[in-house]
Image (spheres, coloured by chain):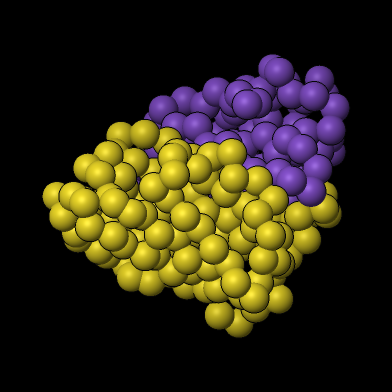
Chain colours: A yellow, B purple
Amino acid sequence: EAGVTQFPSHSVIEKGQTVTLRCDPISGHDNLYWYRRVMGKEIKFLLHFVKESKQDESGMPNNRFLAERTGGTYSTLKVQPAELEDSGVYFCASSLAADSSTDTQYFGPGTRLTVL
Amino acid sequence: DAKTTQPNSMESNEEEPVHLPCNHSTISGTDYIHWYRQLPSQGPEYVIHGLTSNVNNRMASLAIAEDRKSSTLILHRATLRDAAVYYCILRVGGSNYKLTFGKGTLLTVNP
């Protein structure tokens, strides 16, 4: 069974440009999460999808970030325009049943974003 | 956010047991204790979780204090592949839960 995949693995862009990150969750997982670690900080939650709906987007830093999950399968996270402080590693995770006490999140390898 | 406290780093020798402590004095009755680890250049990986009773799985054991204010992740025989940052996380909330990562414990395993 394929795990969570993320594309690209690395992205280097200039300040002001747009970048779109993609996450493919484990097949059948309705829950999809985005997290990020910026330089020197801890991994922070960004948002949570249940199927195509945003369940919790309290961690999104500002309106330059737009997450979508059309059709409830893969998700994209767009940063427009990118700023220097957006540099970091963006992780995607998915889970099967968030309402179950045994639910666990499976993480992808992350996308390393560098904004110059 | 529910807080956990872990040592910044620990060191172990290969083939020896490792006990990774975590304090969570503000835990509430419905909070689950989750452990994840992050190997170099990878995303976090689930290790184990529990509520009140001690738990065992193929990766590790989780010992939970009777008052639930602390727990210990036990790796029975550390291998070089176990070198990672280990995160103790309180799962707060029902179906709308998110993982709150702290700094974790960097485990070094010596050959």
Q: Position of residue A36 (x, y in %)?
A: 43, 47
- Classify B54 as above or below A101: above
- Classify B71 as above or below A59: above
Left or right: A52, with B93 as reference point? left
* Residue A40, quarter of the rendered image: top left
Q: Which of the image's four quarters has the N terminus of chain B?
A: top right
Left or right: A4, with A102 as reference point? left
Q: Position of residue B60 (x, y in %)?
A: 64, 51
- Decide if residue B65 is in sight here: yes
Q: Position of residue B14 (x, y in %)?
A: 42, 50
- Decide if residue B83 is in sight here: no
Left or right: B45, with B73 as reference point? left
Number of numbered discs: 0
- Classify B92 as above or below B83: above
Q: Nearer the viewer, residue B111 or B82?
A: B82
Q: Residue at x 44, y 44 (%)?
A: A63
* Residue A104, quarter of the rendered image: bottom right
Q: Residue at x 79, y 48 (%)?
A: B95
Q: Residue at x 74, y 46 (%)?
A: B96
Q: Nearer the viewer, residue A50 or B94?
A: A50
Q: Position of residue B110 (x, y in %)?
A: 34, 46
